[in-house]
Image (spheres, rainbow, N blue to C red):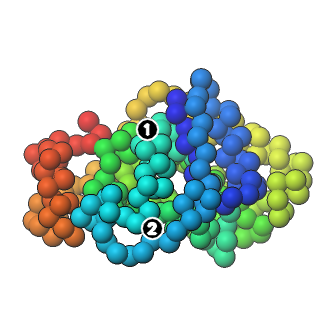
Amino acid sequence: MKIVMLNGQNHKGSSYHIGRIIADKIKGDNEIKEFFFPRDLNHFCAGCYRCIEDDAACPYYEEKKIIMDAVEEADILIVTTPTYCMHVSAPLKSFIDTTFDYWMVHRPKKSMFSKRAVIVSTSAGASPKSTMKDVEDALFHMGVPFILKYGLAVQAMNWDGIRQSKKEKIDKDTTKIAKKLSTDKKPRVGIKTRFTFNMMGMMQKKGWSASPVEKAYWEQNGWFDGERPWK
């Protein structure tokens, strides 16, 4: 299987280590690609909306395309981010902002509806729940149907500082997560995703989209005529 890791910091901290442990435990002859933010996309979304008309018109398209090509080819996505001020890291949020045109409300990618993903976030003390929700919202709106979350307050500033008993818990937990990801079976697209997709389709068909380009995209994919990206 092809696994892509999207890491919300350049350094390999606790969140990264847990994500990598999961990747290494997934059964099979796997190919693992890693991207780090801000290293691999060191830009904020310019808010120019040029991507609405043409994805390639994004000022950062060349860098973004390298990442998104890998994401589209992947079977499994592992997103790691430290918890900063109760939310996702700024570099990862910047990447998410530049990919909003791939959401169901705009021009979703068919390949996203067949992926599995896991979100990993650690914090020094407070719960990383709101951090993982930031990422979960983005993955959901891109169409990913199977999303696991693993958050942990590690009471440490780095991986080496985590006490052994907690690392033993991480080892057990990551084994369970990897087992859920170690399958070739296509994930089921749930009711919430189907409902959201259908609502976006109704909006596009009525011409309420951000651009006629989006309506044409939906029409070209046959989504107005009953075709669905998960079939």
Residue displayed at 61% across by 63% down: 38
Pointer 1 residue = 73
Q: Position of residue 49 (x, y in %)?
A: 31, 72
User: In the displayed structure, would residue 80 be above or below residue 129?
Assistant: above
Pointer 2 residue = 97
Amino acid found under the numbered disc labelled 2? Asp
Do labels 1 and 2 touch, CB within 8 Å?
A: no
Residue 200's quadrant in the figure?
bottom left
Amino acid found under the numbered disc labelled 1? Glu
- Mark with earlier residue (1, 2): 1
Q: Identify which residue, 175 or 158, lies in the foreground.
A: 158
Q: Position of residue 182 (x, y in %)?
A: 56, 30
Dot 1 falls on a residue whose secondary structure is helix
Q: Position of residue 77 (x, y in %)?
A: 52, 45
Residue 188's quadrant in the figure?
top left
Q: Is residue 197 left or right of residue 161?
A: left
